[in-house]
Image (tube, rainbow, N blue to C red):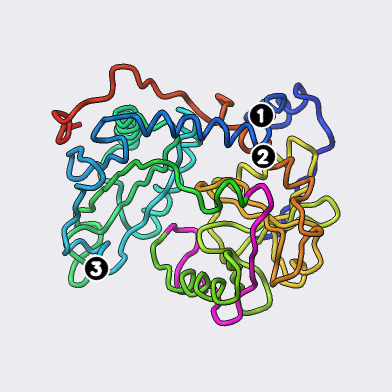
C-alpha cells in the first residue's frame, strides 16, 4: 500500500462535519473512570438477570440456544480445517457500534475465500439485533462465523458447496482489563516467531489460523510480558495477537500497512485522530521506531484503545500513558454514542424465558 498521510488542522465541530463523512461528537468526551464505572454498573445489572440468555446466546441452524448449549457438527470444515472467516462487532451501553463496517468486512472476507454469507445481510443484521435484545446484555462481544460447511473443497467447486453461518453474543470481552488500561500494559517484540506472510494467509481476511499469534503469546508470557508484537521477518512491525499496533512519534501516529488486519477499531482511531488534527501515517513501520517512539497503544474491538507503557522490559513515555493516547482513548469511547457510528437497541419486551430457548428467527 502506498504511504498514506492524513493531516487535518485543529477544527471546530462545524468544520469537522465539513471534512468528515461522519461526525464525531467530540464534546461528549469522557474519562477512563467514567467509562469503566458505567460498565461496572451495567455488569451488576446483568448479574441479576435470570434470563437463560444473560450469559450468552447463540444462533445455530436457525435456532436460538443459550451459549453453553450451542453445538457445531464435528465434520464442519471450519472446525476440521479452519476453513472459515469471521468478524466481531460489539455492543456498548446498549448501542451496536459500527455494525455495517463489520458486515462489509465479513462480506469482503467471504468473497476472498470463495465463501458466501448464507443469509441476506439485512436479515443477519436483524437477527443480531434480536439476539442482543433477547439476551439483555448491554455490553456485548458479538461474533459471526461463516464456514465452508460439512463438505470440503477437495473434489468439489467452492461455489457449489453450502456454507454455514453461526452467530453468538456474550458479555463484552477485554484483551486488556480496566485496571491495566489505567497504567498501561507490557509488550515485547517477538524473537522466536514471525507473522505468517501475506502470500500464505491474507491478513485482511479475519481467520482462526492463530499458530503464529499463539506462539507470540507464549513467548510474551515466558519473557514476563502480556502482549506480543510480531514482525514480518524484514525488520518491520505487523500486528499482535488480535490487535493492531499504533506508535506515536513527534505528534504523529504510525501504524503498519501490511501483514495486518485492516481493523475497524483502527479505522475509528484514525477518525478520532483526524478530528483532533493529529497526523496519521499508514505505512511500513520499522521495528526501530518502536524503540524510539513517544507512545504506544494497541487497538481492537475487545478492549478499544489499550496503552502500552513497557516494551521489552523498558519504559515507554517514562512508564506513563501518553497524552495523545489519552486523547484517542477518550474520542474512541465517545464515538460509541454518536449516531453516525452506532445505533440503539430496543430491549423492551424482548427478553424471553426458558420457552424461548429454541426460538426460530
Q: Judge whether 200 appears above or below 342 on screen.
A: below
Indicate which disc, 1 or 3, sits on the residue closer to the N terminus.
Answer: 1
In the rendered image, which residue does mark 2 sit on? 271
Q: Which mark is residue 24?
A: 1
Task: Tell me the crowding category of disc 2: few under 14, some 14 to 19, or many 20 or more residues within 10 angstroms, Cα based.
Answer: many
Residue drawn at x 52%, y 72% as measured from the top left: 216
Residue drawn at x 61%, y 35% as measured from the top left: 333
Magenta part, dominant SS = loop
Query: Where's residue 229, x and y in %?
Result: 61, 68
Quadrant in which the N terminus appears: bottom right
Query: Where's residue 151, x and y in %?
Result: 17, 63
Task: Tell me the crowding category of disc 3: few under 14, some 14 to 19, or many 20 or more residues within 10 angstroms, Cα based.
Answer: few
Q: Examine the structure image and report whether residue 119 is included in the region drawn in magenta.
A: no
The CA distance from mark 2 to mark 1 is 8 Å
Task: Say which element carries label 2.
Answer: helix
The magenta-colored residue range is 181-206
Task: Tell me the crowding category of disc 1: few under 14, some 14 to 19, or many 20 or more residues within 10 angstroms, Cα based.
Answer: many
Query: Left of 215 or right of it: where is 329?
Result: right
- Could you say which is closer to the camera, residue 144 or residue 303? 303
Q: Judge whether 103 appears above or below 349 on screen.
A: below
Query: Where's residue 52, x and y in %?
Result: 23, 35
Indicate which disc, 2 or 1, sits on the residue closer to the N terminus.
Answer: 1
Q: Which mark is residue 80?
A: 3
Give the quarter of the image for residue 118: top left
The CA distance from mark 2 to mark 3 is 39 Å
Query: Left of 247 or right of it: where is 110?
Result: left
Q: Are marks 2 and 1 in contact (CB under 8 Å)?
A: yes
Task: Say which element carries label 1.
Answer: loop
- Could you say which is closer to the camera, residue 54 or residue 350? 54
Q: How many marks?
A: 3
Indicate which disc, 2 or 3, sits on the residue closer to the N terminus.
Answer: 3
Q: Which mark is residue 305?
A: none
Amino acid at each position: 500500500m502506498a504511504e498514506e498521510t492524513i493531516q487535518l488542522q485543529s477544527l471546530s465541530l462545524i468544520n469537522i462535519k465539513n471534512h468528515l463523512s461522519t461526525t464525531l461528537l467530540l464534546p461528549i468526551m469522557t474519562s477512563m473512570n467514567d467509562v469503566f464505572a458505567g460498565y461496572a454498573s451495567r455488569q451488576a445489572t446483568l448479574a441479576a438477570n435470570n434470563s437463560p440468555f444473560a450469559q450468552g446466546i447463540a444462533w445455530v441452524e436457525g435456532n436460538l440456544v443459550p451459549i453453553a448449549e450451542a453445538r457445531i457438527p464435528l465434520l464442519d470444515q471450519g472446525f476440521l480445517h479452519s476453513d472459515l472467516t469471521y468478524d466481531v462487532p460489539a455492543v456498548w451501553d446498549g448501542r451496536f457500534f459500527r455494525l455495517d463496517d463489520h458486515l462489509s468486512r465479513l462480506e469482503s472476507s467471504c468473497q476472498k475465500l470463495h465463501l458466501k454469507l448464507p443469509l441476506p445481510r439485512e436479515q443477519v443484521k436483524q437477527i443480531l439485533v434480536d439476539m442482543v435484545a433477547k439476551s439483555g446484555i448491554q455490553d456485548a462481544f458479538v461474533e459471526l462465523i461463516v464456514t465452508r460447511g460439512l463438505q470440503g473443497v477437495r473434489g468439489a467447486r467452492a461455489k457449489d458447496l453450502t456454507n454455514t453461518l453461526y452467530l453468538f453474543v456474550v458479555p463484552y470481552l477485554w484483551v486488556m482489563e480496566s485496571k491495566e488500561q489505567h497504567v498501561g500494559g507490557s509488550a515485547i517484540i517477538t524473537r522466536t516467531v514471525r507473522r505468517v506472510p501475506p502470500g500464505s494467509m491474507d491478513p485482511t481476511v479475519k481467520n482462526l489460523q492463530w499458530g503464529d499469534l499463539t506462539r507470540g503469546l507464549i513467548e510474551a508470557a515466558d519473557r514476563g510480558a502480556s502482549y506480543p508484537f510480531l514482525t514480518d521477518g524484514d525488520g518491520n512491525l505487523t500486528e499482535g495477537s488480535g490487535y493492531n499496533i499504533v506508535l506515536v512519534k513527534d505528534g504523529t501516529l504510525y501504524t503498519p500497512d501490511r501483514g495486518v488486519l485492516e481493523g475497524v477499531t483502527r479505522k475509528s482511531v484514525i477518525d478520532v485522530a483526524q478530528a483532533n488534527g493529529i497526523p496519521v501515517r499508514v505505512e511500513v513501520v520499522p521495528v526501530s521506531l518502536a524503540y524510539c517512539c513517544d507512545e504506544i497503544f494497541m487497538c481492537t474491538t475487545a478492549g478499544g484503545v489499550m496503552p502500552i507503557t513497557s516494551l521489552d522490559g523498558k519504559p515507554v513515555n517514562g512508564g506513563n500513558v501518553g497524552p495523545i493516547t489519552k486523547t484517542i482513548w477518550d474520542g474512541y469511547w465517545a464515538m460509541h454514542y454518536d449516531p453516525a457510528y452506532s445505533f440503539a437497541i430496543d430491549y423492551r419486551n424482548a427478553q424471553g424465558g426458558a420457552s424461548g430457548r429454541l426460538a426460530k428467527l
